[in-house]
């Protein structure tokens, strides 16, 4: 059992100043959190030595994916809680390194607002043919391409978690007909219809915009394979803010090359960074965002800490912690 | 005085099939319009001969800007009403060709929904650094650039007519602080503050996103000159869906070249089409849309006819026609 007053260590990345926690950020977030923020014994480090020393007595670790990949497994006799400041933790799989008495929390929820804004922007960009405009612009070509209003068009959002749900919500506000795809086909307040992945074949032929916003798990890897992508109708567009491996990237490029798909707004790729000379760089009607769509430096760390404290509060109150990462299902 | 049953001629463009009215579109719109749509004597033409013949007895003309520029002034003894299917009619100025007994209507209002969607998309693109991503993409460069949420940012919309008002409305829905700029500083339900152009110097230094959505008139030509554009803060972005000549295009390019402005999403230019080799094609952090932002082929003609009938109804009822173009103020 964890104490209310905890020994917490924050291990910062060495090379990514934008996502380094400061003492000030901690103090401000702790003050916002009220009673659950008070009294903890907190250290903050960035070297391997800082980490090893802190793990001797830390009960909770707050850190990012790169640190986890580099420094785990490690000796950490009192560690009971790890909060990783990413939502998608598939790079930590298989999870046999995780001791059974340690709970792993992810950062699902931090990205919600930004994902919603990026996602609806991407849908509007597809409707307004921005990927095509940009392709013409690259060629110095003034050529009218007419866009359309989004009202009444069909948006299929795969994943209704912290990233997909806000896209669905904005979609409805813009008058789109929204189909959500998730593990259980229970109704969702922001969707006209919710289906499971088994039913994708039925909805893809009438989907104008397909937005992928789900975690990468054994069940979702390659979900949009060549056959399924081919079911999208002529002129459809694709948004991917989930993970590159959710779809067959080569098939997507083929469908863009042939003009079957009118555009794609992509934030995630296989591999990342997208190598020099990769065909994606020159595939027509693609917008390439370098895996930055759902992050915002100024609010990222404060939000992450708010989520961490929310979980500590649930733990203290004997409630289920909302961000527990289920290593079996993979999110 | 015009009769309730009118002799109406529709002159289609020769070279723009997307904006040609069909008999079917007329009949459908007339049916939607109810009593005011019934009984008119309507002809539809596209050659110069069609036009000359129809002008012998037509009381009302429905046509587009290109036809007006090419075939006016002309002999039209019974003509009392001209409905031009564009909102901005500055290319018809000076208006001394317009007989005093003929009322000129523009198409203000047709573009509202599309302008709102394009406009808020453009603001979201600026916030998400899409112009910068596209510039990096052109160079095959994977380089993270962080965007921001739009909530709390400051949007200044110049023009609160059929194009500016919906941008302001969406802006508020996304949590932006919206300043509207128009001829009279009367409050507007979709703006936090309304100012006149005289006060632009005060608001530009705190404007994150500047959207131009006003007509080109003697008063607005060059409104955003080099000095005023320079008042925008480091990192600000510009959207222009009004007319190219509203701003000093060269100054805009300079501010983008120097990195003072973070991006621009432009639908209008001087001149149009933007010539081959024009510096705009290679200015960094610009998205070029070829004057298509506010038009949608599938809904354009139906909406235009709805607006025309709305004006006929006002005329019959002795009300002011909402789309009368004021040749003195220029919109």
Image (tube, coloured by chain):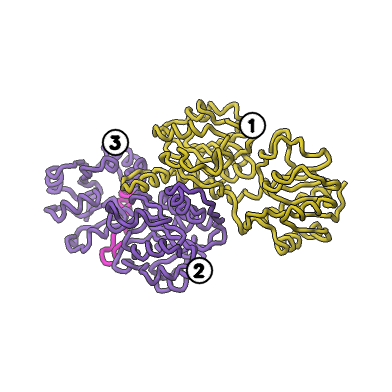
Chain colours: A yellow, B purple
- Are labels 3 and 1 assigned to the same chain? no
Label 3 resides on the chain identified as B
Which mark is nearer the camera, 3 or 1?
Answer: 1
Task: Give the camera-side residue of B77 and A32.
Answer: A32
Q: Is residue B320 magenta?
A: yes
The disc label shown at residue B262, or none: none
Location of residue A201 in the rendering, given as x and y in whole percent from the top left corner: 53, 26
The image position of residue B41, as x and y in percent, is: 21, 42
Q: Position of residue B278 (x, y in %)?
A: 30, 56
Q: Quadrant of the C terminus of chain B?
A: bottom left
Figure quadrant of residue B240: bottom left
Packing grade of label 2 (10 A; few <14, some 14-19, many >=20) is some
Q: The residue marked by circle 2 belongs to what chain?
A: B
Q: Nearer the viewer, residue B89 or B281?
A: B281
Q: Residues within 10 Å of mark 3 (few under 14, many from 20)?
A: few
**Residue at the (47%, 58%) spot, across then down:** B168
Residue B236 drawn above or below residue B122: below
Q: Which residue is mark 3?
A: B24
Q: Secondary structure at mark 2?
A: helix
| Residue B1 in which image quadrant | bottom left
Q: Is residue A311 visible?
A: yes
At 43% from the left and 35% from the top, the residue drawn is A256
Q: Is residue A278 left or right of residue A311?
A: left
Q: Have a look at marks 2 and 3 and say if they share a chain.
A: yes
Q: Which residue was labeled with disc 2?
A: B206
Compute the Cα span from label 3 to label 1.
43 Å
**Disc 2 to disc 3, how far (Cα)?**
50 Å
Span of residues in magenta: B307-331
Q: Are marks 1 and 2 on the same chain?
A: no
Q: Which mark is residue A185?
A: 1
């Amino acid at each position: 059992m964890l104490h209310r007053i905890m020994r917490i260590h924050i291990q910062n990345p060495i090379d990514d100043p934008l996502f380094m926690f400061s003492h000030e950020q901690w103090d401000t977030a702790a003050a916002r959190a009220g009673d659950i923020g008070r009294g903890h014994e907190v250290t903050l480090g960035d070297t391997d030595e800082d980490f090893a020393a802190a793990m001797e007595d830390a009960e909770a670790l707050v850190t990012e994916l790169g640190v986890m990949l580099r420094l785990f497994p490690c000796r950490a006799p009192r560690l009971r809680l790890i909060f990783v400041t990413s939502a998608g933790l598939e790079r930590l799989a298989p999870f046999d390194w995780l001791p059974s008495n340690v709970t792993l929390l992810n950062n699902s929820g931090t990205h919600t607002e930004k994902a919603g804004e990026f996602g609806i922007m991407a849908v509007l960009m597809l409707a307004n043919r921005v990927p095509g405009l940009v392709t013409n612009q690259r060629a110095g070509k003034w050529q009218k391409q007419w866009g359309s209003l989004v009202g009444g068009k069909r948006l299929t959002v795969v994943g209704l978690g912290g990233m997909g749900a806000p896209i669905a919500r904005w979609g409805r506000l813009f008058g789109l007909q929204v189909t959500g795809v998730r593990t259980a086909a229970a109704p969702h307040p922001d969707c006209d219809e919710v289906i499971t992945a088994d039913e994708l074949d039925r909805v893809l032929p009438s989907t104008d915009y397909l937005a992928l916003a789900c975690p990468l798990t054994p069940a979702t890897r390659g979900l949009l394979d060549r056959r399924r992508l081919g079911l999208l109708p002529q002129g459809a567009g694709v948004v991917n803010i989930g993970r590159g491996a959710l779809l067959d990237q080569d098939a997507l490029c083929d469908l863009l090359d042939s003009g079957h798909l009118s555009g794609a707004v992509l934030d995630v790729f296989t591999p990342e960074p997208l190598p020099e000379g990769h065909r994606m760089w020159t595939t027509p009607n693609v917008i390439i965002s370098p895996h930055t769509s759902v992050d915002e430096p100024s609010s990222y760390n404060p939000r992450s800490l708010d989520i961490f404290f929310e979980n500590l509060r649930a733990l203290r109150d004997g409630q289920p912690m909302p961000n527990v990462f289920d290593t079996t299902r993979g999110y």
